[in-house]
Amino acid sequence: MVAQGFRLGSGAGALRQVLAGAKIGCINLALRAIVVAVIGVALAVLAAPEGGAIRLQRGQVTEPASEWLGDQNPSSLPRVLVETIRQDPYSFFRRVNRVWTERVCQAFGSEKMPSVRLHGDAHVEQYGLTATAQGLDDFDDSAEGPAVVDLVRFIGSLDLAAARRGWRANRAIDQFLDGYQRGLQDPSYSPRAPGVVQRLRAKPVQTPAAFLASSEGRMEAVPPEVEPQARKALELVAAAATTMPPGYFALKRIGALQMGVGSYTTPKFLMRVEGPSAAPDDDVILEAKEVSDLGGVTCITTPDDGKAVRVITGSRQIGRLRHQVLSVIPDLRSDAPPRREYWLRSWDRTYAEVRIPDLRSNRDLEELAHDAGAQ
């Protein structure tokens, strides 16, 4: 089968004119030039014969998908994930964020740009909502680096999202950059909730009991050593969370979690804890996720490859969705090195993520893009 995909072009030299004379932390309207001259997110072909290797064709050059997937060779990935990225360019795009970022770094390597707090993997389907807030969430890859990392990533996602729906991305890209500039000029600028958010909020919300049951339904068996590790980790969180009632973090059940696309193979766990009282319906669901490895990505900086504090920092500095629990815990799988920290967050039963099929019109995409730019 054949699907449309993408390529990442270069042309970073054009950015000189964009940034010429700009003040630190401020990029003016000339940033729109990136859309054509710099970002170069052009549609190409993602050729994926049934049962065959995934290859990216860019002009006259055919590139194996392994060049983008890195050490995640298709043959080593779960079949369900391979089929997903074979059939859908957007899913492939979600899977290859690290290599995408590395290529952005290469394209802009000769430019001197200020370092800012990055989302790190900003794209349309990272946009989430709760009953009270909306915006880009999931700060797994948050770090410090040039703003162009987030700009290129999000505009690439607009291009692919629009292509999937048979639309043109031009106006959505303009709206994204307009929101971005207005947010720089006025940090208090807050666009109204996009129409797609209003529609998703109007849907019935699970009852507490149904939410807890559906969360437990996602839990898969874990190795024997995980549960005692989790109990020790939660004791550390409880000791620091002095405003929580005693027993709040008492573990009632734990299971492995397998979901997502970009993070499908990242170790993740779901935990059900006691919550504010002994009543079962106010139990709390916590997700623990191993921090991603960003070591070696040339234009970004992280505290340490194994430290998850950067995720917490990104969530607090850029994020709009507030989590009742947001913390860092030790590795849940082993006491033996090398160990990677996990970041821990609570789930909100009103939470939903915008998916491309939720977008009914190009206007929906434009409104979402504008709000994400402002964020």
Image (spheres, rainbow, N blue to C red):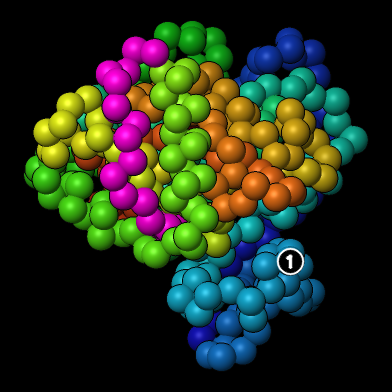
Q: Which residue is denoted by mark 1 in the rendering? A: 71
Residue span colored magenta: 242-261
- State the SS at label 1: loop
x and y, in percent, of residue 135 in the image: 39, 31
x and y, in percent, of residue 216 in the image: 26, 54
Of the pair 91 and 213, the residue shown nearer to us: 213
Above or below, comparing residue 64 to residue 268 in the picture:
below
- Quadrant hosting residue 312: top right
* Mark 1 surroundings within 10 Å by alpha-carbon count, few (fewer than 14), some (14 through 19), many (20 or more): few
Q: Is residue 191 left or right of residue 280?
A: right
How many marks on residues? 1
Name the residue located 66 percent from the left edge and 15 percent from the top edge.
Answer: 26
Query: Is the stretch drawn in magenta largely helix, strand or loop?
Result: loop
Residue type, numbered disc 1: Asp
x and y, in percent, of residue 345 in the image: 41, 35
Of the pair 83 and 172, the residue shown nearer to us: 83
Name the residue located 50 percent from the left edge and 36 percent from the top edge.
Answer: 233
User: Can you see residue 193?
Assistant: no
Above or below, comparing residue 158 to residue 1 in the picture:
above
Name the residue located 74 percent from the left edge and 12 percent from the top edge.
Answer: 24
x and y, in percent, of residue 213 in the image: 18, 53
User: Can you see residue 300?
Assistant: yes
- Quadrant hosting residue 14: top right
Of the pair 14 and 184, the residue shown nearer to us: 184
Q: Is residue 228 left or right of residue 253?
A: right
Name the residue located 44 percent from the left edge and 50 percent from the top edge.
Answer: 227
